[in-house]
Amino acid sequence: MEHLQLAYDLLVIMIGLAALSIVVFWAARTGENDLRDFSIVYTCFTLVLIVLMLKKYLSLNVEDYSARAWYWLSGAEQILGYAVIVAVIFFFTGVYRVESRKAITFLFVAIMLVSILLILSPSGAVLDANTRTIRFGTGYRIALLLYFLSFTFALTLGYGLLRRAWGTERRNFLVGLLIFATVGYLETTLNLPGSLGTTVATPSNEGDFLFSSIPYALYGVFLIVYFLEHPAVPAPLAMDALPESFLTKYGITDREREIILKVVQGKSNADIASELFISLATVKTHLHNIYRKIDVDSRYDLLARVRSGQ
């Protein structure tokens, strides 16, 4: 049974890596900051699954699997778990265009570092190599509570964002992400009382099934289909000028008008920078301002707004 679970884990990771490759390519081709930040989230959780699978494999198949290696892999799993939460918060605050994004992210990075120090401290988790056990203390329980509270904040941000994006093309994209995150949150909530009461852990505990891997795999399939159906650059419109009413309504500057025209003509960020003789960072800054003015989140939403003239 354990080997079937390892085969399942390997399949899930392969799906995740395939989806991640497509997302990274799409983000690099379009230069979309939101997709870049999302790829960081997906990478972190994929690494969590890889570490979990590695721990299971070693405990089942390697007789001289050292207790110290198991201890450090467990620590890496904890660190990556916190990294997922920080990456999710960074992603959601970016989509929200929150002005205090850096301060919020720094706060949760600080919480993550404090949690890791608590876990690695003598009051957190101590390895007993002779009995192959990790003994947990008060520091570990405080770190778990900080993780749970951070996860709650991240999920609340996500559902707030879903309300804002419900009428856009990104709705299904966010729904899938939130289903995946919600299953993980419920799993964390149900396991929290037992985790807080846990005093020791052994390698034999590594066979537990991670239920959030199911929506992760399904979401990976969705991402593969979604990005294969949507070209990295939107289908261009044959436009040489934008309606004056559109420019006036949103307060579009001359430079922003030039960039919008390039976008609807199918140009990538790199192409726009080259043709307008400006830096790639400047293009991204202008696009950020354009999205904020028009209240859209992507090239596709911008194209739809220009096409409708609203």
Image (spheres, helix red, strand yellow):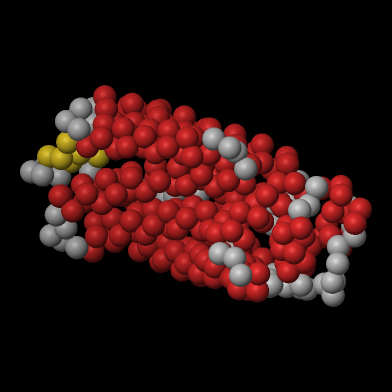
The quarter of the picture where residue 99 lies is top right
Residue 262's place in the image compared with 139, above or below, is below
Position in image of residue 46 (x %, y %): 43, 58
Q: Quick check: can you spot residue 256?
A: yes
Q: What is the number of callouts on the image?
A: 0
- In x, y percent, where is residue 122? 16, 30
Looking at the picture, does residue 150 appear above or below residue 34? above
* Residue 250 vertical position relative to residue 299 in the rendered view, above or below: above
- The x and y percentages for residue 171 are 72, 51
The answer to whether residue 219 is left or right of residue 120 is right
Q: Residue at x 86, y 62 (%)?
A: 242
Q: Is residue 83 left or right of residue 113?
A: right
Residue visible at 44% across and 53% down in the picture: 45
Single out the residue that lies furthest toward the left.
130
Q: Quadrant of the N terminus?
A: bottom left
Q: Nearer the viewer, residue 289 or 214?
A: 289
Residue at 76% x, 53% y is: 253
